[in-house]
Image: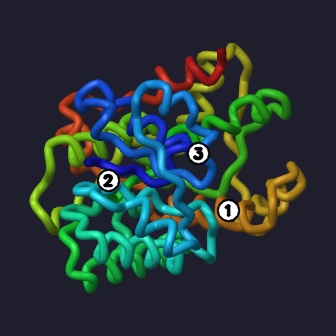
Amino acid sequence: MIAITGASGQLGRLVIQSLLKQVPASQLIALVRKPDSVADLAAQGVQVRQADYTQTDSLERALAGVERLLLVSSSELGQRLVQHQNVVDAAKKTGVKLLAYTSLLHVDTSPMGLAQEHLATEAYIRNSGLPFVFLRNGWYTENYLASVKPALQHGAFIGSAGQGRIASAARADYAEAAVAVLAKGAPAGTVYELAGDTAYTLAELAAELSRQSGQTVPYVNLGEADFKGALLGAGLPEGVAALLADSDVGASKGGLFDDSHQLSQLIGRPTTPLDALMKAALL
C-alpha cells in the first residue's frame, strides 16, 4: 500500500493522479483532514483515510498497512516540525517500510529561512531509523507565475531576487519525481536535489512575460522590506509575505539554483520549460 499525506493539496493530488497511471487504485491511500475534499479520488477507487498532522491517534490508524509513505510537508509555517514528527512517529509504530519526504533544495546549505523546519525534519527522520528518501524540491515555477496577472495590471514584475538564477520546475514535474520513488522504490538513504533543467533571473522571466503578452513588463528589484510591504499591500498575510520576501533574497544568493539535472533524470524526461508554463498562465 502507498499512502500520500496532504492528498487534497495541489502537489498531493498530482501525485495520486500520476500514480493512478501505474498503480491500481486499490493500492493507493489518500490521507486528508477532510475526506469529503477528495470524494473524486474515492470515486476512482482510491482509499481515503482521515488523518490530521496534529492528531497522533488518527495518524496511527491511517497508516495501518502502509508500506510506502509520501510525507508532503505541512503548509503551516512554524508548526511544521511538530506535525512532521507526529507523522514520523506514527510511521515508525505502524511499520512503514519507506518514507519519502518533500524537503527543500540544498536544505543543508540554503540561505532561506524556509530551510530551518525542513532541515530539522530531515534530522528527525534520520534519527528515527526509518528507511527514507528525501525529495529536496526546488521552487515551483507556479510560485512566480501566480504574479503574472498582477504584473500585467500594474505594469511591472516585482521581487527581491536580484540577479539570482532560479532553476524552477512545474509542480507536476516534482509530483512525477515522487511517483518514481513511490511506484518503483529507491535505495534507503537516497537524497535527491530536484530542480528544473534551465534557470532564469526574474528579469528574464519578466522579458518572457513581455514577449508572450505583447505588453512591456519590466522587472523591478526591491529591497526585502519594500517587497514584503508590497506583498502586504496586496493582501497577503504577514507570515506569507515575510516568507516570500525572504525566499527571494535567498534566491539572490543562489538558494534556488541547481544544475545537476537530477529531476529530469528521475522522471525520464526534460522538465517543463518556463515558456510553456507562462503560456498556460496567460490563458
Can you say whether 154 is above or below 85 in the image? above
| Residue 35 image label | 3
Which mark is first along the chain, 2 or 1?
1
* Three-letter code for the amino acid on which mark 1 is drawn: Ala
Res 110 quadrant in image:
bottom left
Q: For mark 3, give the secondary structure.
A: helix
- Residue 157 picture location, percent across and down: 71, 39
* Three-letter code for the amino acid on which mark 2 is drawn: Asp
Which mark is first along the chain, 3 or 2?
3
Question: What colouring style does the render use?
Answer: rainbow
Cα gap from disc 3 to disc 1, whole angstroms: 34 Å
Decide: marks 2, 3 in contact (CB < 8 A)? no
**Image point 73% across, 19% down: which residue?**
215
**Image point 35% across, 55% down: which residue?**
70
**Image point 65% across, 57% down: which residue?**
160
> In the depicted view, which residue is nearer to us: 9 or 226?
9
Q: For mark 2, give the secondary structure.
A: loop
Residue that label 1 marks: 245
Residue that label 2 marks: 258
